[in-house]
Image (spheres, grey):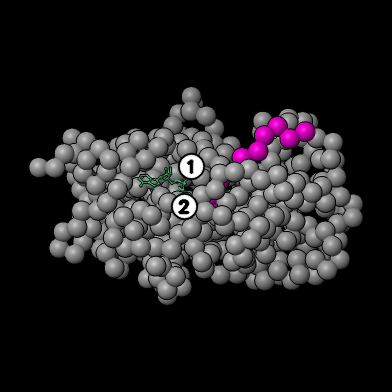
Amino acid sequence: MPETFDERGAFDAIVIGAGIVGAACARALARTGRTVCVIEKNSAVSATTAHGEGNLLVSDKGPGPELTLALHARSRWDEITAQLREECGPHFPDIEFEAKGGLVVATTPEGAEPLRAFAATQRAEGVAAQDVTIAEALELEPWLNREITAAVYYPQDAQVEPVIAAEAMLRSARLAGAVVHTHTEVIGGIHEHGRLAGIRTTRGEIHAGMIVNAAGPWSGAVATALGAPLDVRPRRGMVLVTTRMPQRVFHKVYDADYVGATQSADADLQTSSVIESTRGGTVLIGSSREQVGFDTALRVEVLHALAAKALRIFPFLAGTAVMRTYRGFRPYVPDHLPVIGEDPRLPGLWHATGHEGAGIGLSISTADLIATLADGAPTPVDPDPFRVGRPALLREAA
Ligand SMILES: Cc1cc2nc3c(=O)[nH]c(=O)nc-3n(C[C@H](O)[C@H](O)[C@H](O)COP(=O)(O)OP(=O)(O)OC[C@H]3O[C@@H](n4cnc5c(N)ncnc54)[C@H](O)[C@@H]3O)c2cc1C
């Protein structure tokens, strides 16, 4: 018998990766009554989920499947927050869910009409996108640059503290019977009768009928190691954090050009401003996008570009100090849609990945889809656009 490090040796489901997507999937699967084992190569919640922001946005998504997924997630966050609070108890830190709303502004005359037109397309899909006058925008955000040319208010936009949210989901999964093995790296698959029947790890083997690849930007490497390559790449992002200050930013405020940056396939540097204050009193200024592999170097020109764009929205930031900066790697797929479901090339292998810059928000709907698909139950949204076998994805896979 090969060595196994878990006395059970076999589970209904293994989830690879203890970021927010893996945590949400483990929780959802454990709550269906399945035995679940989470395998994480480092510490739990130490990778992308700990290096981003906590925006739960509908405002940055145009009509299409990602918006549908985001609207479903948004409809669930209040309920999930209440459940986690109840399950984790009063001594567990609050996940800081806050339905604070978002304000998207145009900073140039040419940017005004496209912003209003984009909001109109979203309204047609059920997004609450309210055109506001400059005076109304200044009432919402008194410190805003008075030179802005247009603004749209999105009351559905919200925020969460991603690390605490993911840890709370992991705790909830454990309470439902899941086990979590950290510092255990998945290095290969166990194949039986054309199926993926288990995984090989640095600590031994373990079996399951369902293995969920939720390894974030490393999902491509994990998929290859398991025998079904997938084109998931890292897309680096950097964030600036100011020192604490009295609150002067009250919503999520961002530049309308952010939407173009998220949807761009350009590998070169893109920056756009998303500005928000945290409960701790700091202001987060995000974020950049560039495809440079897993390069961890901090680049001053990226930080400079981020800061310069933020000043176009909030000139008062010119007088504030940056306390620190950090970076992470978004899990990017070429058609900008998450990959959710069973892999038709290798039954037993499931993917829950490719959320790029929206994985905190979309973790909830991803978990709902994985659990309902596994049960053969009606899904909350159409899973077809996210299927693993879609041509855009497999065409690119080497
Ligand atoms: C700068 C920046 C800002 C962002 N802002 C937002 C935002 O405001 N809102 C939002 O929704 N999203 C945001 N994102 C995106 C979001 O952070 C990600 O989409 C999300 O965290 C992905 O979660 P994950 O669980 O898939 O990946 P991760 O958190 O990276 O978790 C994957 C885990 O898999 C583990 N793993 C990898 N390989 C193996 C292996 N072989 N064996 C075992 N374990 C393995 C890793 O160690 C890791 O812990 C941002 C990202 C960045 C970089």
- Whether disc 2's CB lies below 8 Å from ligand 1 is answered yes
- Does 376 sit above or below residue 174? below
The residue range painted magenta reads 321-330
In-image side of 134 versus 338 (left or right) = right
The answer to whether residue 328 is magenta is: yes
In-image side of 383 versus 242 (left or right) = left
Within-10-Å neighbours for mark 1: few <14, some 14–19, many 20+: many
On the image, the x and y values in percent for residue 109 come to 86, 66
Question: Which residue was labeled with disc 2?
Answer: 217
The answer to whether residue 286 is magenta is: no
- Does 91 sit above or below residue 55? above
For residue 69, say whether it is visible.
yes
Within-10-Å neighbours for mark 2: few <14, some 14–19, many 20+: many
For the stretch drawn in magenta, what is the main secondary structure? Answer: strand
Quadrant containing the N terminus in the rendered view? top left
On the image, the x and y values in percent for residue 85 come to 48, 34
Question: Which residue was labeled with disc 1?
Answer: 47
For residue 375, say whether it is visible.
no
* Mark carried by residue 261: none
- Whether disc 1's CB lies below 8 Å from ligand 1 is answered yes
Q: CA distance from mark 2 to mark 1?
A: 9 Å
Q: Disc 2, disc 1: CB below 8 Å?
A: yes
Quadrant containing the C terminus in the rendered view? bottom left
Give the residue displayed 53% in from the left and 64% down from the top.
336
On the image, the x and y values in percent for residue 372 come to 35, 58
- Amino acid type, callout 2: Pro
Q: Secondary structure at mark 1?
A: loop
Give the residue displayed 63% in from the left and 43% down from the top.
298
Closer to the camera in the image, 85 or 236: 236
| Label located before the other in sequence (2 or 1) | 1
Give the residue displayed 22% in from the left and 40% down from the top.
204
